[in-house]
Each structure stands twice: as structure tokens, then as C-alpha cells.
Amino acid sequence: MIAALDLGCSEFRSLRREDQRLVARRIPAVYTVVDDLPTNRKALEQSHIPYSTASDALIVIGEAAIEVSTLLSRPLVPLLLEGRLADQDPIGRQVCAWLIELLLPAMPGENNQCLMTLPRGEISAQGANGWTAEFLQHVVQLQGYQTITVSPTEALALAELGENEFSGICMCIGAESVHFAVMHQSHPLVESRLLKGSREIVDDFAHARRKYLWDHEGNSFINLPAIHQWLAQGDLCLVAHQSADDEWLGEAYAELLLSSMFSVKRKLQSCPDPLLKQPLPLVLSGGPVRLPGFTQLVEEALKMSGLPVQIDGIRVASFDPYSIARGLLIQATLNAGEGVEGMLVLEAA
């Protein structure tokens, strides 16, 4: 079997071929913990919410965790803060394994391949996130797959820039990082990574606006479900501000975009490749890119940063939230010596 696994810091996504169809799944990379009491077990079972047990607690993951967090006033815990698991976090390891097992079926045999991205776009098990990268790859391998890691911008180019000979600019705005890359025939010509993303903005916004919940013992925590629901509804605009909240978010995202562009500007200035003299399409991917006004913020940041590139249009990735997973599956199909045309037929079906 050929499979793709996009391990983002806010959501895990998988895409695989099964018979004559493509199977896509995604699960938020969050969990919540409630006390292991008979009343809590009964409430979860009556609502048909799956849970796991650990250390006198009940663990709920994904979309169900978001619901339970609100109903029972429990903190919603991001799984991969700063792109990694804590060194002493047995619950986090258990949740990671559970999520991957839900997204990838266990497969016998030796010819199963999984192309995957790692949190924060790591491509090797090195540095501060090395232990987490090794652990995640090991879990996938235990499911019966050989693993190959790919950067999110390379996968995005394969998924979205086919009409441009896989050449252009890719920006992936994630929860914990922003990736900017100029791609030439699906290979990075110039690339940069800023280790800051939308999660810090959301957390700062919550504290600034005192968006809290309180449990029965009087402890406060960020009301992440309510904030994400508000963002998903799209009742805001990052440029034509309708409220003080809109203005706050617009300024925060503008600063993030400028920081990411300034981090790559010197590399672009020192690159002599003739591709940079041509107008290039810019493709955006990630959670915040569909917020009203985000594309205009990118246009403004490009002007203010003075990046030495010509932009031939800015667009949001057509296949989001599965664009990166789609690019991974295309590469895996090519690695297996198969034609991509068959996969595109499955998409059309």
C-alpha cells in the first residue's frame, strides 16, 4: 500500500489509495483529560465517545476532545507544542500512537510505503525535535510501512504547481512554523523557516481578550474551542476591520508574515538563479490562509518587505486541507514507479 501522512502541529491528515478510491482522513492533534469516575465513563459511553485510560484518567482525542472540553470544562491540550512531545509525557506518546493508528491501517508485508511530513516541517530526527521525529516515524513503521520524510513546501509544489512545471513560491503557515520556499521543478531553490506560527497568535489573543473557561475547582484555562469556532465561522476580516478583535488579529498576522519574509530576503538577494527574474505564482497553505483578508495581508507584506521576486498571482491551495498530503501521495506514487494519472482518475471519481 502507498500512503501519505501529513503530521501538522494542529492536525494529523492521511491520504491513501484503497481499491479504486482515495481515502482521506484528518483528526485535530489535541486531547483532553477527565477524571476516571463512573459518571464520566457513563457520559462518554452514552455519547458514543471513544476514550483511553491512563493514570486514573480518561483521555479523549480529536474532535471529540473539543466537544468534551467544552461540556465538562476541561482544558483542551495541544499535542505538539513547539512541534514536539515533552520528554516526560506518556499521555502525549499514547495519543500520538492512537492518532496514527486511526489514520493508517496496519499493513502486513514489506512493500508498504508512507511518505510523511514531520511537525514544524522537520526532515530528519535531529535537533530539539529529534526525539519526537524518531518516535513518530517508529509508530508509522510499527504499522508496517517504510517511511520517507518530505518537507511541506516540496509536497505543496507537487500538489499545486503542476501547471507551472512545479515551479513557483510555496508558503505553508502552520500552527508552530511558517515555511517559505521558491521551488524549481519541485525542488527548493531558496527556502526559509520561521519557528513561529498561528498558535502563538491565538494564545496571545485569548489572553489579551480574556477568553477563558473555569473548571469546578476555579482553575482557568484558554477557551480554545470557542476561539477556533469563531475563526472557522469567518465572521471577521483581517484588513477591512469590523471590530477591535479583527484589528488585533490582522496586525498579529501581518507581523508574522513580515517576519517570515524578512527571514528569506537575504537568501533571495544572494541567489543568482534566472528563475527569480521570472514572474512566479504564490500558493498559500495552512489553517489561517482562508480567513477573510489573509491574501491581502500577504500582498501588503510582500510590498513592505521588498522581496526581490515578481509575483504572478496569489492563491490559496486548491486541495487544502489535504494539499500537502496530496503532494506526498504523488511523490510516493512516482517512487513506486506508477503513473500519477491513475491517482488523478481516483480523485475525479
Image (cartoon, helix red, strand yellow):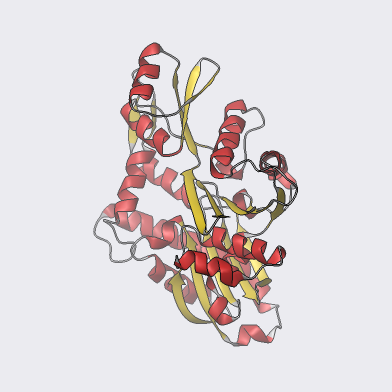
Which residue is drawn at the image coordinates 29% and 53% (left, top)? 233
Vertical order, 291 against 61 (above or below): below
Which residue is drawn at the image coordinates 49% and 63% (left, top)? 285
Q: Quadrant of residue 170?
A: bottom right
Which residue is drawn at the image coordinates 73% and 52% (left, top)? 111
Foreground: 165 or 201? 165
Point out residue 332 in the picture as x, y percentages from the top left corner.
66, 61
Q: Count the labels in the image.
A: 0
Foreground: 268 or 15? 15
Point out residue 7 in the picture as x, y percentages from the top left corner.
58, 49
Q: Residue furthest top?
A: 38
Point out residue 123 in the picture as x, y percentages from the top left corner.
70, 54
Q: Is residue 258 left or right of residue 130?
A: left
Point out residue 125 in the picture as x, y percentages from the top left corner.
74, 47
Vertical order, 217 against 134 (above or below): above
Foreground: 68 or 344? 344
Q: Is residue 113 left or right of residue 229?
A: right
Vertical order, 62 against 189 (above or below): above
Which residue is drawn at the image coordinates 34% and 44% (left, top)? 227
- Determine if residue 30 is in view: yes
Foreground: 189 or 110? 110
Q: Quadrant of the C terminus?
A: bottom left
Q: Residue furthest front?
A: 19
- Determine if residue 217 is in view: no
